[in-house]
Image: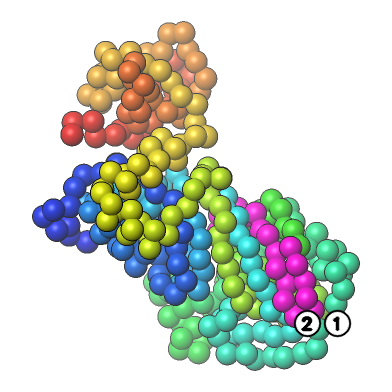
Amino acid sequence: MGRGARSPKDFRDLDGILILDKPLGISSNAALQDTRHIFKARKAGHSGSLDPLATGVLPICFGEATKFSGYLLDASKRYRASCKLGQTSTTGDAEGEIVRDVPVKVSRQQIQQVLETFTGDIEQIPPMHSALKHKGKRLYEIARQGKQVDRKPRRLHIHALDLLSFDNECLVIDVHCSKGTYIRTLAQDIGEALGCGAYLSALRRTGVEPFWGEDEYTIDRLRILAGQGMDKIDALLLPVSAALKEFPALLLDNSRCLQLQQGKVIRMEPAGSLGIHRLVSGNGRFIGLGEAFPDGSLAVKRLMNTTR
């Protein structure tokens, strides 16, 4: 998760989540810093980087939301990917040099059949141009030296892979995938399976679990609204608990909330469901996450700062 640098004096404590529509051509961290300065937020981070050539959904976590952003790293994601058929590049995307150019002779039926083979559990070898480390060095640093190293295949899951359009040279697909999926590699592998090669020519992230269907905001739009008053952009923030919808809510009276905030383990009588829960106070306020155990005890996993 990207983090902000030291805050100017007029920056403020702010808690919540914004669904940013990252623009083309800048890094996720640059988009984060722009957004943080628009909101004048002391603390901010993003969850799930996008390459500069990719656009779309980038959740920005402010303040206390950064404590829970790690739970978003396991989230499934959705992309609209454009693949240039008949060519392969050194990086697997439009930034690389073209190293092969062959005629494209495939049909929609062939494409449909190939896409089916990439649906479900698959294995994928991470690309050299990635941030993964090998003996302490980023793979992209090694690749820039013109070197290759062996990478172990990773197991991942493609929930859905749908053909959106095909015009003989450009294939556009909708991908719903698990964390850790490299869409560049997926485009290359699909091209190889079709016998003509391919590289990723454009990529847009269209969704991140659990924020399906939430409104997205561009940096330009945020600047316009901020000019009308900070309350205009504050109203766009989702609550911190919006990132934790997968966990059931557990309503606690104020005395039990206080015990948990003091670091105590409490007893649940009668014992409820096991595992992680969203802890909610009697007045409906989200205070953090707790874990319920088979012996009826409940312990804190992470708490909100409720003192400010």
Residue at x 85%, y 64% (from the top left corner): 113
- Most extreme residue toward the front, as rendered? 228
Q: Which residue is mark 1?
A: 105
Residue 244 x/y as whole percent: 46, 36
As for residue 95 lying within the magenta part, the answer is no
What secondary structure is marked by label 2? loop
Quadrant containing the C terminus in the rendered view: top left
Q: Quadrant of residue 238?
A: top left
In the image, residue 218 sits, relative to residue 278, either above or below, namely below
Residue 260 x/y as whole percent: 29, 22
For residue 196, the mark is 2
Depth order, front residue of 304/284: 284
Residue 72 x/y as whole percent: 46, 47
Identify the magenta region.
164-180
Residues tagged 2 and 1 counted as in contact (Cβ below 8 A): yes
Q: Nearer the viewer, mark 2 or mark 1?
A: 1
Depth order, front residue of 226/263: 226
Q: Amino acid under label 1?
A: Lys
